[in-house]
Amino acid sequence: MDRVILGGRVMDPDSNLDAIANIGILDGRIAIITGQSIRGRDTIDASGLVVAPGFIDLHDHGQTPEIYRYRSLDGVTTTFELEVGTSDVDAWYRARSAGARINYGVSIGHIKVRMSVMRDSGTFLPVGDGAYGDASAEQLAEIVKLMEIGLSQGAVSIGAGFPYTPAATRDEQLAVFRLAAMSKTPVHLHCRPTVAGLTEELSLVDETDAPLQVVHINSSNLAETPAALAMINDARARGHDVTAEAYPYAAGMTEIQSATILDVYRDAPDELLGRIEWPKTGERLNRESFDRCREIGGPIVVHDNTEEMVATALTSPLTMIASDSYWQNGAGHPRTTGTYSRVLGLYVRERKSLSLMEAIRKMTLIPAQRLEARVPAMKQKGRLQVGADADITIFDAARVLDRSTYREPTLAPVGIEHVIVNGVSVVANGRAVEGVTPGMAVRASRSAMVA
Ligand SMILES: [Zn+2]
């Protein structure tokens, strides 16, 4: 064995194994799980700790070495940018080919492709014609063609967010969903807010039978989260492949100049604007400061949900955990650094809203299964089984907890002791191991391209 992990509580959400066992790793894969004693060139003592599959995040906008490091400290071994995605799949993977700390993958993003075709000047999200410009027939054909190319280059899924592209007509939306249905690729969609918005999005599923992942159902639906979950249940009962994800925070974050914010807050009264926090100073905004900050541009914190609705979303059997990690120019949301430790510490240990196995399943197996049809490599992730990739997160269930806050989003959690990616430690004894890049690209197989 290259390495052995001895005496930990090994938890596999696929087989429901939950027992003290030893794990042997050979050539980046799990070679043995046994109650017998084993030896390797390197030993991790996991006694008193939980040994789980590495956490898989389907919604991460922080795809840089700096953020990969934060994510690894929170137990994440594979991370994806699937909602906004990219307009150039080959270039996106090429930019990371020198090596990354954790495994990574991307979608072909309708938002990004539309920004490119409509020549939008925004950096992350559209601010001009990408959001507000009507696409001509030629431009729509170009959008579809570029998305097909993205799929042919191995995009993991299709990303979209119609609140960010309000000028996208229903025909344009249908074109995205038809492409998804034809290629059996899930659309990771930022839905229009509230039940009214979700009703429109689900009508696209009824019409095309495209697979759909409803991203951050907590922040899209707020007080209507229970109704939204019921609608997803109904869509599944009609035979559709619809799933959802949630993150464990009652405030969201996005760009102040994006259409989602301007549509709600452009002419809003002070009492509504008070929900918005300018993270650089922590101040709550009013009419005057909103307009001033809008000129500056950048991320804002939006305090618009309740703990009760967050818990409802997280504990539903329909949801998986995904962080929606967000970071720009040194400012970001604490979910970037604390999502997984917060679920394990606050919702599992302190509030007992979820069992430990159920939480692990929502962080590992369910996200892996969401991608498997198009990305067979995901069948080797999200499980602790012989033959699976040695992506492993080892934590202290009695101590694990997030520490990051809206004012101090960089604080690493406590209790995540060891994180292993393809057999290599990226976190050891609770500290980041510097200078290691065992992460690999996760991409759709060539046979999974457009039909
Ligand atoms: Zn997002």
Image: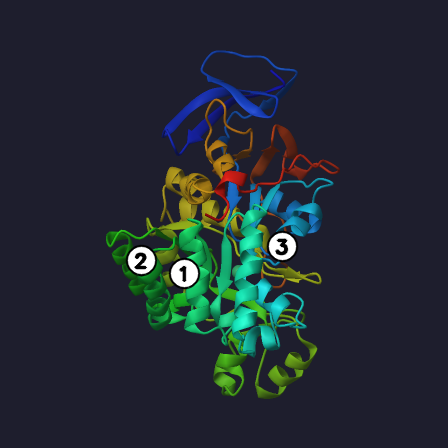
- SS of the residue under disc 1: helix
Q: Amino acid at mark 3?
A: Gly
User: Which dot marks residue 232?
Assistant: 2
Give the foreground label among 2 and 1. 2
Give the foreground label among 3 and 2. 2
Q: Nearer the viewer, residue 204 or 449?
A: 449
Comes first in the chain, label 1 or label 3: 3
Comes first in the chain, label 2 or label 1: 1
Residue 386: x, y in percent? 47, 22
Q: Nearer the viewer, residue 84 or 73?
A: 84
- SS of the residue under disc 3: loop
Is residue 56 shown above or below 63? above
Q: Amino acid at mark 1?
A: Ile
Residue that numbered label 1 is attached to: 217
- What's the CA distance linking mark 1 and mark 3? 20 Å
Residue beneath the point at 62% across and 63% down = 407
Residue beneath the point at 56% across and 70% down = 139
Circles 3, 2 touching at the beta carbon (< 8 Å) = no
